[in-house]
């Protein structure tokens, strides 16, 4: 096991340490960079702009992470396997089915918090995290992409967005393929607005199956620095965006 550098302990308002001080692969917590600080909007914007994100359980101090490598989805490389293509085609054809953006942010993050995670005894989206991301949403830097069937919210995800940089946080579903449809909608939105990457943070089989891949942290940080300088898109989903992924007459 590699012995990491001493963990930086932050006071509210302190700057983050250099990414190179994050604990390396082979340590007890790869990617761990710092503890403490605050979860206010300015701190969160500074963190995400530097490819740093908070992740901790209730009862723990705030922990800040920047893993190397980083799991990233290049939206041009999104993979839609046959079953998902058919599910999206059926979804598009049903007038009761809609993708909405930012109509139920608090509901989405609450559902993500309550969703069971394999191998986890609880959730990392505790009350402090929910309040922090709701404040970020109110400031225009966190958004929900929602899968609706009639008047029922069946799936969704939420992201942090700064300029043209998008950082995926969590997703949930109550129906088969619901969160995959939301992720595909986010990728379609990104393609239409010139957003090249969606940060996925951690390597999971689900994300790899849909085309996400690992990227060296140094490369990712350089890409993010350019993306956050771009104008922010208008966060609204139009059904025509689906055409960037599937033609309107795709097989059902």
Image (cartoon, grey):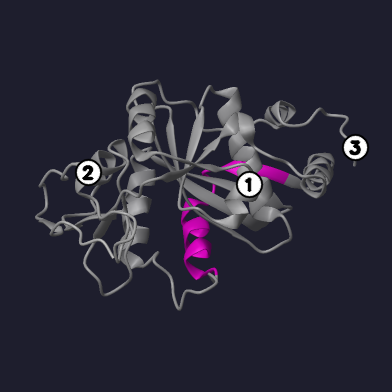
Q: Which residue is mark 3?
A: 251
Reading the image, the residue beneath label 1 is 182
**Residue occupied by mark 2:** 20
Which of the two labelled residues, at mark 1 and mark 3, occupies the earlier sequence position? 1
| Residue at position x 73%, y 41% in the image | 80
> Dot 3: what SS?
loop
Is residue 189 visible in the rendered image? The answer is: no
Question: Could you say where residue 1 lies in the image, as x and y percent from the top left?
Answer: 28, 65
Query: From this viewpoint, is residue 3 visible?
Result: yes
Q: Secondary structure at mark 2?
A: helix
The image shows residue 106 at horizontal and vertical percentages of 46, 56
Q: Residue at 36% x, 67% y: name it.
A: 126
The residue sitting at 32% across, 27% down in the picture is: 225
Distance from the alpha carbon under mark 3 to that under mark 2: 48 Å
Foreground of the two, 211 or 238:
211
Q: Is residue 31 left or right of residue 43?
A: right
């Amino acid at each position: 096991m590699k012995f990491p550098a001493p963990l930086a302990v932050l006071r509210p308002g302190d700057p983050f340490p250099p990414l190179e001080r994050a604990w390396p692969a082979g340590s007890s917590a790869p990617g761990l960079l710092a503890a403490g600080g605050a979860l206010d909007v300015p701190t969160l914007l500074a963190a995400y702009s530097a490819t740093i994100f908070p992740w901790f359980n209730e009862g723990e101090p705030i922990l800040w992470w920047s893993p190397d490598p980083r799991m990233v989805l290049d939206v041009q490389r999104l993979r839609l396997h046959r079953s998902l293509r058919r599910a999206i085609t059926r979804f598009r054809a049903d007038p009761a089915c809609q993708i909405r953006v930012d109509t139920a942010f608090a509901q989405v993050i609450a559902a993500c918090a309550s969703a069971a995670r394999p191998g986890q005894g609880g959730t990392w989206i505790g009350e402090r995290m929910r309040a922090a991301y709701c404040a970020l949403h109110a400031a225009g830097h966190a958004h929900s992409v929602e899968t609706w069937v009639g008047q029922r919210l069946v799936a969704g995800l939420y992201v942090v967005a700064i300029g043209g940089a998008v950082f995926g946080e969590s997703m949930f579903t109550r129906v088969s393929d619901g969160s995959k449809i939301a992720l595909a909608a986010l990728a379609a939105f990104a393609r239409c607005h010139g957003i090249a990457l969606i940060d996925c943070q951690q390597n999971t089989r689900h994300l790899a199956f849909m085309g996400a891949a690992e990227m060296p942290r140094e490369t990712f940080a350089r890409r993010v620095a350019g993306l956050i300088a771009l104008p922010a898109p208008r966060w609204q989903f139009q059904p025509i965006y689906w055409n960037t992924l599937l033609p309107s007459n795709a097989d059902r």
